[in-house]
C-alpha cells in the first residue's frame, strides 16, 4: 500500500507505505518510514522531523534478452516528469520487497507494450486495491556513478496512485541483494548562490567504500514478508530488520524495526508507544489529548486516507558491532501498527539526520554522518546477515562516558566504572579519562564531581598530576581555594556516591602512560 502525507511540521512532506497481505501479517514500505547491552554512546544529534534526502536511481525495463526497451522514458529536466525528475527516476527503498512502477513510469512502459500477467490484492491501512504483476523482464538499475546493474526474470508490480502525485515508483530489495548501496551525505548549499550546491549521491557496488576511520556498523537480519496469492507473483526479497531501543520520560522499549529508506518519518507500533507511556491519559488511544502528542499527519494512498498521530519522544538508540551505541534525541515518530512482526520503522530521517540544516532548511545541528552504506553482500534469504554502516565526520565521533546508560555523563557513572574496571570486556583507564573530560565538575576543585571540594579530590589530583591533561598546578590552586575541610563538608562528601577506591585510582595512574599508546584510533576523547 502506498500512502501520501502533507505534514504541517516542516511544510509538505511525502509518505508512502505499502502493506502486503500475508495471512495475518503485512509489510510496510515508505516514500516520504531487550535493552541494548552497550552503555557508552556516540551522540548523533537531533533526529530530523522528516528526512532531508531519500536515495534514488534510474531504472529501465527491457525484454529478458535486452533487445527491446520499454522505458520508462522521460526528460530528467522536465518538471512535469515527477517531483523526483524523470519518470525513470525511482526511490531506492530498503523497505520494499519488490520493484514497483507507479504513475508516469507505469504509463510510459505500458505505452511501449509492457505486459501484465496477473493482479494481486494490496492492503493499505484503510483498505485494499488491486495492482498488476508483470511478465518476466530484465531490469537495469543505474546509480549516480552511471554504472549499470542488470537483473533478469524480474516480475514487477505496477499501478496508478493519484494520492502519490509525482512519485514514479520504488526500486525494492531485489535490486540490492548481494550488493552494497552508499549514500554520500557530504553535501553543501550556498543560499546566497543557489547554483552552488552538491546534493547527496547514491551508488551501488560489490564492496563497501573505504573505512574513513570513524565507522560504526549495525547488524541487520533478513526477514521475508512474501505475498500469498495466486501465481504468478512479483519477484520478492527479504527485508532488513534491526534492533532499536526507544525512550521517553525514563521509560524504554526495544523491538525489531524495519530498515526503510523509503520512509521519511520513522514509526513505532502502538505496543511500543504504550510501553513508553505515550497514552498519558490512559484512554487507550494516541491522540491530541496525550502530553507527548505533536501533530496529526493525513496519510493517503491505497485504500484511502487516515490521520496518523505524531509524537515527540526522547531518544532512539542502536547497538553497533563496535560495542558503542549510536543515540539520536528529540525523535519525532508516527504511531502506527503495520505488522505483528514489525515493532517500528527506522526511516531515512534517522539515516540523514542534520542534512536539512546543512541545506539551510532546518534549525538543528549539522549532520554527523559523512556517508551511510547498506551492506547486503550476504543477504539473500530469511535470516541472512547484513549491516547498516555509518561513516561519521571525525569531530562527531566522540564516545560519551555514559556508563550507567541514563543518557548523560554525571557522578552516577563513576560507581559503574569502578565495578566494571578490569573485568573481561569491561571498562578501562581510557574510559575513566573520558568520563573526567566530559563531566563538568560542579565547582573549581571538585574533580570527582560529587558537589564537594574535599580530600578525595586532592587524592585524585595527585594520582593524575602530570599524567592526564589539565591536572596541573593551576587545578591544585583551584582545589586549595575551595577546599571545605569542615566536618560538615567531609560528612556530606562521604555520604554522597562512593569515590573510586585508592587502589583503583593508583592502577589508573600507573596505566596512563601505557594506555596513551593504545588509544583506539576510532575514539576521540
Image: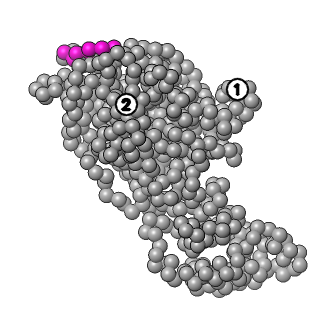
Secondary structure of the residue carrying tag 1 is loop
Who's the residue at 24% across and 37% down the image? 142
Please tell me how crowded label 2 is: few (under 14), some (14-19), or many (20+) other residues with Cα within 10 Å: many
Find disc 1 in the rendering and name its residue. 284
Question: Going by the picture, which residue comes out furthest to the left?
Answer: 67
Magenta segment includes 25: no
Tell me the quadrant of the picture where the N terminus can be found: top left
Vertical arrangement, residue 153 with respect to residue 111, above or below:
below
Discs 2, 1 touching: Cβ within 8 Å: no
Residue drawn at the location 66% of the way across and 68% of the way down: 419
Q: How many marks?
A: 2
Q: Quadrant of residue 337?
A: top right
**Near-viewer residue (215 or 387):** 387
Q: Position of residue 400 (x, y in %)?
A: 57, 61
| Segment colored magenta | 113-119
- Residue 183 placed where, x, y %? 35, 46
Pointer 2: what residue?
Answer: 97
Image side of residue 308 versus residue 1, left or right: right
| Disc 2 from disc 1: Cα separation | 33 Å
When the figure is inspected, residue 395 is found, relative to residue 92, above or below; the finding is below
Tell me the crowding category of disc 1: few under 14, some 14 to 19, or many 20 or more residues within 10 angstroms, Cα based.
Answer: few
Residue in the image at 58% along x and 73% along y: 422
Q: Residue at x 58, y 43 (%)?
A: 254
Amino acid at each position: 500500500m502506498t500512502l501520501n502525507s502533507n505534514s504541517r511540521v516542516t511544510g509538505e512532506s511525502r509518505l508512502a507505505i505499502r502493506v502486503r497481505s500475508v495471512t495475518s501479517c503485512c509489510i510496510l514500505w515508505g516514500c516520504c518510514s531487550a535493552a541494548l547491552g552497550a552503555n557508552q554512546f556516540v551522540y548523533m544529534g537531533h533526529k530530523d522531523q522528516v528526512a532531508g534526502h531519500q536515495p534514488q536511481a534510474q531504472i529501465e525495463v527491457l525484454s529478458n534478452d535486452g533487445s527491446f526497451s520499454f522505458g520508462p522514458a522521460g526528460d530528467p529536466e522536465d518538471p512535469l516528469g515527477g517531483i523526483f525528475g524523470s519518470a525513470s527516476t525511482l526511490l531506492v527503498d530498503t523497505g520494499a520487497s519488490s520493484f514497483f512502477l507507479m504513475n508516469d513510469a507505469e504509463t510510459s512502459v505500458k505505452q511501449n507494450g509492457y505486459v501484465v500477467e496477473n493482479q494481486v490484492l494490496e492492503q493499505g491501512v484503510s483498505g485494499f486495491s488491486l495492482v498488476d504483476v508483470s511478465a518476466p523482464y530484465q531490469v537495469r538499475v543505474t546509480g549516480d556513478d552511471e554504472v549499470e546493474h542488470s537483473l533478469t526474470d524480474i516480475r514487477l508490480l505496477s499501478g496508478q496512485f493519484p494520492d502519490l502525485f509525482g512519485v514514479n515508483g520504488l526500486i525494492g530489495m531485489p535490486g540490492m541483494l548481494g550488493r552494497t548501496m552508499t549514500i554520500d551525505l557530504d553535501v553543501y548549499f550556498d543560499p546566497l548562490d543557489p547554483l552552488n550546491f552538491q546534493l547527496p549521491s547514491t551508488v551501488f557496488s560489490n564492496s563497501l567504500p573505504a573505512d574513513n576511520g570513524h565507522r560504526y556498523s549495525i547488524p541487520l537480519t533478513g526477514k521475508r514478508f512474501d505475498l500469498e496469492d495466486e501465481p504468478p507473483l512479483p519477484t520478492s526479497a527479504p527485508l532488513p530488520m534491526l534492533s532499536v531501543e526507544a525512550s521517553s520520560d525514563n521509560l524504554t522499549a526495544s523491538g525489531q524495526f524495519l530498515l526503510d529508506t523509503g520512509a521519511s518519518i520513522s514509526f513505532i507500533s502502538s505496543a511500543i508507544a504504550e510501553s513508553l507511556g505515550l497514552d498519558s491519559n490512559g484512554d487507550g488511544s494516541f491522540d491530541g489529548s496525550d502530553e507527548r502528542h505533536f501533530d496529526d499527519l493525513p496519510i493517503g494512498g491505497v485504500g484511502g486516507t487516515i490521520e496518523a498521530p505524531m509524537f515527540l519522544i526522547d531518544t532512539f538508540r542502536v547497538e553497533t558491532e563496535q560495542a558503542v551505541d549510536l543515540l539520536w534525541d528529540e525523535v519525532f515518530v508516527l504511531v502506527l501498527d503495520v505488522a505483528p512482526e514489525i515493532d517500528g520503522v527506522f526511516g531515512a530521517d534517522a539515516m540523514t539526520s542534520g542534512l536539512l540544516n546543512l541545506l539551510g532548511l532546518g534549525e538543528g545541528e549539522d549532520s554527523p554522518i559523512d556517508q551511510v552504506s547498506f551492506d547486503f553482500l550476504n543477504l539473500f534469504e530469511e535470516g541472512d546477515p547484513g549491516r547498516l554502516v555509518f561513516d561519521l565526520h571525525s569531530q562527531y565521533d566522540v564516545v560519551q562516558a555514559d556508563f550507567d546508560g541514563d543518557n548523560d555523563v554525571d557522578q552516577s557513572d563513576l560507581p559503574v566504572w569502578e565495578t566494571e574496571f578490569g573485568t573481561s570486556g569491561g571498562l578501562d583507564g581510557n574510559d575513566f579519562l573520558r568520563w573526567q573530560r566530559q563531566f563538568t565538575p560542579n565547582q573549581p576543585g571538585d574533580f570527582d564531581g560529587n558537589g564537594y571540594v574535599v580530600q578525595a579530590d586532592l587524592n585524585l589530583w595527585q594520582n593524575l598530576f602530570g599524567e592526564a591533561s589539565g591536572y596541573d598546578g593551576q587545578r591544585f590552586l583551584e582545589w586549595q581555594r575551595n577546599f571545605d575541610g569542615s566536618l560538615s563538608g567531609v560528612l556530606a562528601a562521604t555520604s554522597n556516591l562512593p569515590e573510586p577506591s585508592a587502589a583503583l585510582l593508583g592502577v589508573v595512574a600507573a596505566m596512563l602512560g601505557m594506555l596513551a599508546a593504545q588509544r583506539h584510533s576510532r575514539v576521540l576523547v
